[in-house]
Amino acid sequence: MPITWPPKLLRSPAVRVGLSISIATGLYGVSFGALSVTSGLDFWQTMALSFLLFSGGSQFAFIGVVAGGGSGLAAMGAATLLGMRNGIYGMQLNVLLRPRGWRRYAAAQLTIDESTATSTGQADPDEQRRGFWAAGIGIFVLWNAFTAAGALAGSALGDPKQWGLDGAAVAAFLGLLWPRLKGGEPVAIAVVCALATVLAVPFVPAGVPILIAAVVAAVIGWLSHGRQDEGLEPDIDPYTERHPGYQTGTGTNARGAK
Amino acid sequence: MSLWVWLLLACLFAYAWKLVGYLLPASLLQNPRMSRVAGTMTIGLLASLTIVNALATGQALVLDARLGALAAAAAALFLRAPFLVVVLAGAGAAALLRLAGWN
């Protein structure tokens, strides 16, 4: 792809979708930063998660377990299990983009729900490539900047409960779950796992009920035959909101396109 | 200090997952069952994290202002509010319920 920066690049529909999804996703980095410091992590631990781990669901999982009094091991376990889907995205993107050399290692770090959805939602290979890098780099920069802003604001708040920040964490997890509940089956999986969690809470150390729910979900996935891409949806779907580069169908349908 | 160790391990494993898709031959990973498990586990983990943060305090199940946050977030999501508004609705509901005296 010849670098024709920036006027021609900004005319690319994929780049425009990538940039608008960057702003939408980057903004909620504020809530991550604020919740992380009120969960007991310090500023640099919060920044390390956004810079090095860089996967919203896993980051919220890590701080969610710590906030609930769970061990570091349980926090790591929940974050790592949630990160498995990024391996599936990496496989899809490797087929589409075929990055070589150092780009492969950079692409891996930028492989998250939103960059994958922006890329796979395009039909033209050049647009797929532009969409991936625009969304990936854009979200990385803004997510880290807004995490820092949120962390600074969060440490200035005082008593987090007075501001309802524990309620904000509940809302954040429901917000991450919601877009993945398309149809009856994912709802059933969510209900079964929520029940398993509630039943486990009194009997095992904090953090462990979440890992039990993960095992229950994995067994359901292993034994049942439903949609292969179930649950693999972005938190903010680039192609269902009215973005300037809107072209193809929903991210879910477009994802199958290879 | 030990939280740093788990945190950095979590970062390392997260990157390992991402890289695995690019480095291993596609044929090895194109097992539909693995995609399926990755998807159902994502749903299960997020559902579990939602309920733990709403009901659990250590090893006890407690009904408090966080339940109001869960309801407010669900209402906001039902009305197709953006993520940040959903989070603010949850915080606002919990804060207001506490102000009204429900811990």
Image (cartoon, grey):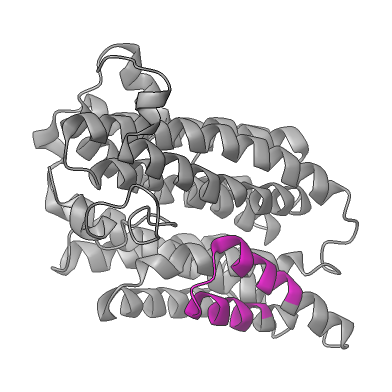
Q: Nearer the viewer, residue A181 or A251?
A: A251
Residue A94 seen in the current view:
no
Q: Nearer the viewer, residue A205 or A100?
A: A100
Instruction: Where is residue A135? Give x, y as percent.
Output: 42, 37
| Residue beneath the point at 52% across and 69% down | A174
Instruction: Where is residue A117? Give x, y as percent.
Output: 31, 48
Please indicate whether residue A79 sits to the left or right of residue A92 in the image.
Answer: right
Quadrant, the C terminus of chain A: top left
Instruction: Where is residue A33? Give x, y as percent.
Output: 69, 46
Residue B52 seen in the current view:
yes
Instruction: Where is residue A171? Give x, y as percent.
Output: 60, 69
- How many badges with numbers are in the image? 0
Report the residue that reaches farthest toward the top.
A101
Is B17 drawn above or below residue A163 in the view shown?
A: above
Task: From the image, give the main secondary structure of the stretch colored magenta.
Answer: helix
* Residues in magenta, as a range: B69-92
Could you say which quadrant of the image residue A230 lies in? bottom left
Quadrant, the N terminus of chain A: top left
Q: Nearer the viewer, residue A30 or A53?
A: A30
| Residue beneath the point at 58% across and 70% down | B52
| Residue beneath the point at 12% across and 47% down | B31
Please indicate whether residue A45 sits to the left or right of residue A132 in the image.
Answer: right
Is A212 drawn above or below residue B80 in the view shown?
A: above
Membership of A63 in magenta stretch: no
Membership of B70 in magenta stretch: yes
Report the residue that reaches farthest toward the left.
B27
Please indicate whether residue A55 sits to the left or right of residue A146 in the image.
Answer: left
| Residue beneath the point at 46% across and 76% down | A194
Could you say which quadrant of the image residue A181 lies in? bottom left
